């Protein structure tokens, strides 16, 4: 029954698959389809699926979670029918329903969003539960996108640490290649992808199932189109397939970053050897299709690597590197990555020998600050004065909280937060004065503000309180090392580095505010 989920079965199975793959780099799995069709796997996938609000969004067949539960037999019958279709070989994925979502900050531009059917989402999730631990063992430590236990801040912390001074002096990296692939996810070649999947999976039924999802097609204005390239739009398995495909880029720079199942010292020795021979070093950090290559060498060597990378992508992955958008920047000038501005700046505190130190820092880009101001300005203007202050506060708080949680790790974040808090406070105050034109400003402040000694006046209406960006403070995201726990690597040597537990204790405290 779907209500009684044996979560230990799926977790133990994933741990075994991860352990076997890690122990045997050449192992190929020939019997995985039975695990996908297992009742316990499908039940666990269903419980994960219904926890997402997307389960109420219908696909091309119009089926939602509510309709499934209202049918005779309910969810149990729904899962059993899918299981029988899979085992009998009659299951066929349905085309994906496409919706166009406006791109934030880009008027007139839209991003296509695919909505698979509920049945297809369930099968994809069950397939992902089996394949993810297998390929996770082969992913490179410098890849952070769509991986369990990893985040954008881990990728940023890795770059920041690489730009920090070492015992030998200032960081050797002088330039950075900001990679940009033209239409990355839409340009994934199905043949190349399946060849990379076959390196670990030889089960023909699983391979046919993956290929069926790739060929399912997209329904656009009532017409079904079958693209010859690209990953399934909106598919649960798409991020995993994309990572499998883009691992080829990680392999290209594996000599200097770190290969799977390898001691960190090995890569450090190779970097030291190449440096002693006067050769350039290329250190790559990737998050999904966004990647940067730190270059320890001259600008000419960086330009040569850019051309070589374009040739590599064309020949190996059949993708095109955007030569216009792929820029080469000095690390001291700064570059953009994952919404932050990364730059190597001179430290305020000199080193022991009296010389200035150059350290890696993360800053909030001015464009992001202006985008937030514009978004709040438009939102405040769109709310009529007939609404209550509480309704305005309830719409602002989620935006401010999410923005704060993402940028709280930036250098001088408190300074930017204080400026924004002051601007937002007065923006809300202008709306309130417009709402109560005949009420004096002093009286409005007395009525709608909360005065606490030592704190800034806070707008309040009933139980709604306007949150400030500075709440919770700021902190530096720790560099968690190479081996980050993912729930399957129970080896004590693959836990957090010493001292990181103190950060997470502070992080959990601040997140609760």
Image (cartoon, rainbow, N blue to C red):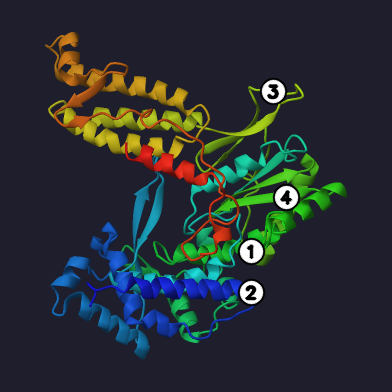
Of the pair 442 and 355, the residue shown nearer to us? 355
The disc placed on residue 350 is: 3
Q: Nearer the viewer, mark 4 or mark 2?
A: 2
Per the model, the C-alpha gap separating discs 4 and 2 is 25 Å
Whichever of labels 4 and 1 marks the residue nearer the N terminus, that label is 1
The disc placed on residue 25 is: 2
Q: Residues within 10 Å of mark 1 (few under 14, many from 20)?
A: some
Q: Nearer the viewer, mark 3 or mark 1?
A: 3
Q: Quadrant of residue 329?
A: top right
Q: Quadrant of residue 37?
A: bottom left
Whichever of labels 3 and 1 marks the residue nearer the N terminus, that label is 1
Whichever of labels 1 and 2 marks the residue nearer the N terminus, that label is 2
Can residue 84 be seen from the camera position used here?
yes
Q: Are marks 1 and 2 in contact (CB under 8 Å)?
A: yes
For label 3, the SS is: loop
The answer to whether 71 appears left or right of 190 in the picture is left
Per the model, the C-alpha gap separating discs 3 and 2 is 47 Å
The disc placed on residue 260 is: 1
Q: Which residue is mark 4?
A: 282
Residue at the bottom extreme, as displayed: 88
């Amino acid at each position: 029954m779907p209500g009684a989920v044996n979560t230990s079965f799926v977790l133990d199975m994933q741990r075994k698959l991860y352990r076997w793959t890690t122990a045997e780099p050449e192992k190929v799995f020939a019997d995985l389809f039975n695990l996908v069709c297992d009742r316990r796997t499908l039940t666990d996938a269903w419980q994960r699926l219904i926890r997402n609000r997307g389960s109420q969004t219908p696909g091309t067949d119009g089926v939602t979670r509510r309709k499934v539960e209202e049918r005779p037999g309910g969810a149990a019958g729904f899962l059993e029918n899918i299981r029988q279709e899979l085992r009998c070989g009659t299951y066929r994925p349905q085309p994906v329903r496409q919706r166009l979502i406006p791109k934030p900050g880009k008027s007139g531009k839209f991003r296509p969003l695919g909505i698979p059917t509920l049945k297809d989402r369930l099968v994809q999730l069950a397939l992902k539960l089996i394949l993810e631990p297998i390929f996770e063992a082969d992913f490179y430590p410098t890849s952070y996108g769509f991986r369990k236990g990893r985040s954008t801040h881990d990728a940023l912390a890795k770059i920041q640490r690489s730009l920090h001074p070492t015992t030998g002096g200032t960081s050797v990296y002088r330039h950075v290649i900001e990679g940009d692939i033209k239409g990355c996810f839409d340009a994934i070649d199905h043949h190349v992808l399946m060849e990379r999947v076959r390196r670990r999976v030889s089960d023909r039924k699983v391979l046919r199932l993956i290929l069926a999802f790739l060929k399912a097609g997209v329904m656009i204005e009532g017409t079904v189109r079958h693209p010859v390239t690209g990953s399934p739009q909106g598919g649960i398995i798409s991020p995993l397939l994309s990572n499998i495909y883009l691992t080829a880029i990680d392999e290209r720079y594996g000599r200097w970053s770190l290969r799977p199942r390898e001691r960190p010292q090995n890569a450090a020795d190779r970097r030291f050897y190449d440096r002693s021979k006067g050769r350039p070093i290329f250190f790559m950090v990737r998050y999904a299709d966004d990647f940067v290559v730190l270059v320890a060498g001259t600008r000419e060597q960086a330009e040569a690597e850019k051309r070589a990378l374009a040739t590599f992508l064309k020949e190996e992955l059949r993708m095109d590197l955007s030569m216009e958008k792929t820029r080469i920047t000095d690390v001291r000038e700064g570059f953009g990555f994952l919404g932050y501005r990364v730059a190597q700046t001179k430290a305020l505190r000199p080193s022991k020998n009296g010389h200035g130190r150059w350290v890696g820092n993360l800053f909030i880009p001015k464009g992001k600050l202006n985008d937030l101001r514009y978004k709040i300005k438009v939102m405040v203007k769109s709310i009529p004065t007939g609404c209550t202050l509480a309704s305005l506060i309830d719409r602002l708080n989620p935006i401010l909280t999410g923005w704060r949680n993402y940028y709280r790790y930036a250098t001088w974040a408190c300074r930017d937060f204080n400026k924004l808090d002051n601007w937002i406070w007065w923006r809300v105050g202008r709306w309130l004065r417009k709402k109560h034109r005949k009420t004096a400003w002093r009286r409005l402040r007395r009525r709608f503000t909360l005065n606490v000694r030592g704190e800034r006046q806070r707008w309040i209406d009933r139980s709604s309180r306007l949150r400030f960006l500075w709440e919770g403070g700021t902190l530096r995201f720790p560099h968690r090392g190479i081996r980050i726990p993912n729930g399957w690597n129970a080896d004590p040597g693959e836990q957090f580095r010493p001292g990181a537990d103190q950060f997470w204790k502070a992080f959990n405290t601040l997140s609760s505010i």
